Image: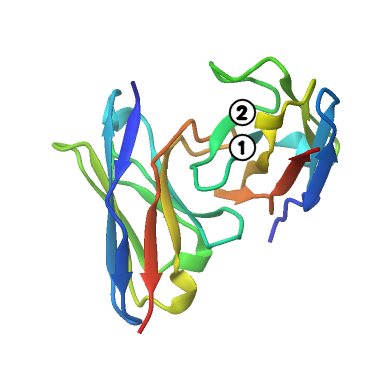
Amino acid sequence: QVQLVQSGAEVKKPGASVKVSCKASGYTFTSYDINWVRQATGQGLEWMGWMSPNSADTGYAQKFQGRVTMTRNTSTSTAYMELSSLRSEDTAVYFCARGDRGPSSYFDFWGQGALLTVSS
Amino acid sequence: SYELTQPPSVSVSPGQTANITCSGDKLGNKYVSWYQQKPGQSPVLVISHDSKRPSGIPERFSGSNSGNTATVTISGTQALDEADYYCQAWVSSAVVFGGGTKLTVL
């Protein structure tokens, strides 16, 4: 069965960087994009961007341009999201989700989420 | 920037029909997906392509999209349907989510 298993919770200081992983199993990793979505406590879902495991192409939401980097390791079927210059407002649960880009995009499988706390 | 607007909350009695709307400019020209999220859990896809139910999603969930409004309908609402619901669309090479609607079954 399709599974996306994310790395654990992180605590970082303002200005630091964090790298969250998302290990895929149960399907061909290179056949679907991986998207990243975050959710602050009590708030809605916020899309951060997509990464193609096949080509390594990426597309980032304008809000995160210059601060986010999405990569992958096809040998381990793992996607990564690195966010830099962290601030307190980045405190949130970060989800990876499988799904293609484009007009018919939807996310059919999600990771369990990884809590990031940014605090001095 | 493009916005998807959802009512913050909707209430429904058990067994009745719940309609959750999502509004956006010419939204009917785009595909809309819907996600259910229960407290402490990851979102679950309940509707894609405006009206398609993924495998495992009960038949009581249905969707429509026309004009400026997309709607997810839950027929015969059950207590276990109480959750937050989010609409989502692809707009100008980016994903947009609605603000979410809390469905209360009381």
The N terminus of chain A: image quadrant: top left
Q: Residue B10's spot in the image, x, y percent?
A: 82, 44
In the rendered view, does B26 fall on the left or right side of B3?
right
Q: Earlier in the sequence, mark 2 or mark 1?
A: 1
Disc 2 element: strand
* Furthest residue in direction left, as rendered: A75
* Furthest residue in direction front, as rendered: B106
In the rendered view, does A116 fall on the left or right side of A42?
left
Badge 2 is on which residue?
Answer: B46
What residue is shown at x 83% (from left), y 41% (from top)? B11
Q: Residue B7's spot in the image, x, y percent?
A: 81, 50
Res B73 → quadrant = top right
Residue A92 position (above or below residue A119): above
Amino acid type assigned to the residue bearing label 1 in the image: Gln
**Which of these two is toward me, A88 or A65?**
A88
* Mark 1 chain: B
Amino acid type assigned to the residue bearing label 2 in the image: Val
CB within 8 Å, label 2 to label 1: yes
Res B51 → quadrant = top right
Badge 1 is on which residue?
Answer: B36
Q: Residue B5's spot in the image, x, y percent?
A: 77, 52
What residue is shown at x 73% (from left), y 51% (from top)? B4
What's the CA distance linking mark 2 and mark 1?
Answer: 7 Å
Res A46 → quadrant = bottom right
**Which of these two is toward me, A40 or B67?**
A40
The C terminus of chain A: image quadrant: bottom left
Disc 1 element: strand
In the rendered view, does B98 fall on the left or right side of B67?
left
What residue is shown at x 29% (from left), y 23% (from top)? A26
Q: How is the image coloured?
A: rainbow
